[in-house]
Amino acid sequence: MTTIKSVRFWNGNKSAYRQQFEFDVLSLLLTATADSHGHATIIDDRTDLPLAEQEGAVLEHGSDVLVTVKGNAKFAGKRFIELALSVTKQLLGQRILFARDDRVADFTTTEAIKSMSVGVPETC
């Protein structure tokens, strides 16, 4: 049996709600595996890392676990084990539209919205 004493979970750069949700998911996972791997405590590191380079190096600076979007460019070329399941249950797929007053009319029809293009910042 492999025994894990503690897990350093980098849980920064996100909303308090997401931090709590992801902490709870990790807690449940560790509880479910306690019989086979021993009890582990979570060191919940909520340090804000404002630079993409800092966030990309978080595993190299002592963190054991983090949650991020699939294909996050900050972790390209880094060594890690990816769990191919969604811990957010598509929570991050839900979006709320915010528009400036002078652009609201651009978003009033499905056709208008479909003609637009959207993107994710390169640093994600």
Image (cartoon, rainbow, N blue to C red):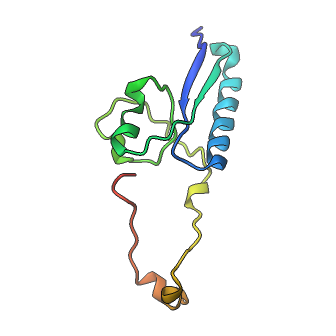
Query: Which percent across, then down, holds residue 34?
Result: 69, 18
- From the viewer's side, name the closer residue of 78 and 97: 97
**In the figure, is residue 118 to the left or right of 5?**
left
Residue furthest toward the top?
1
Task: Name which quarter of the figure residue 120 lies in.
Answer: bottom left
Q: Residue at x 43, y 30 (%)?
A: 81
- From the viewer's side, name the closer residue of 69 and 14: 14
Q: Is residue 83 above or below residue 69?
A: above
Q: Residue at x 52, y 36 (%)?
A: 47
Query: Which percent across, then down, holds residue 124?
Result: 40, 52
Q: Is residue 21 above or below residue 107?
A: above
Q: How many marks?
A: 0
Query: Which percent across, then down, holds residue 19?
Result: 62, 42
Q: Residue at x 61, y 13 (%)?
A: 5
Q: Residue at x 42, y 32 (%)?
A: 58
Task: Name which quarter of the figure residue 114 lies in.
Answer: bottom left
Query: Which percent across, then down, holds residue 30?
Result: 66, 25
- From the viewer's side, name the closer residue of 2 and 53: 53
Residue furthest toward the left?
77
Task: Name which quarter of the figure residue 61 lies in.
Answer: top left
Q: Is residue 81 above or below residue 1?
A: below
Quarter occupied by the N terminus: top right
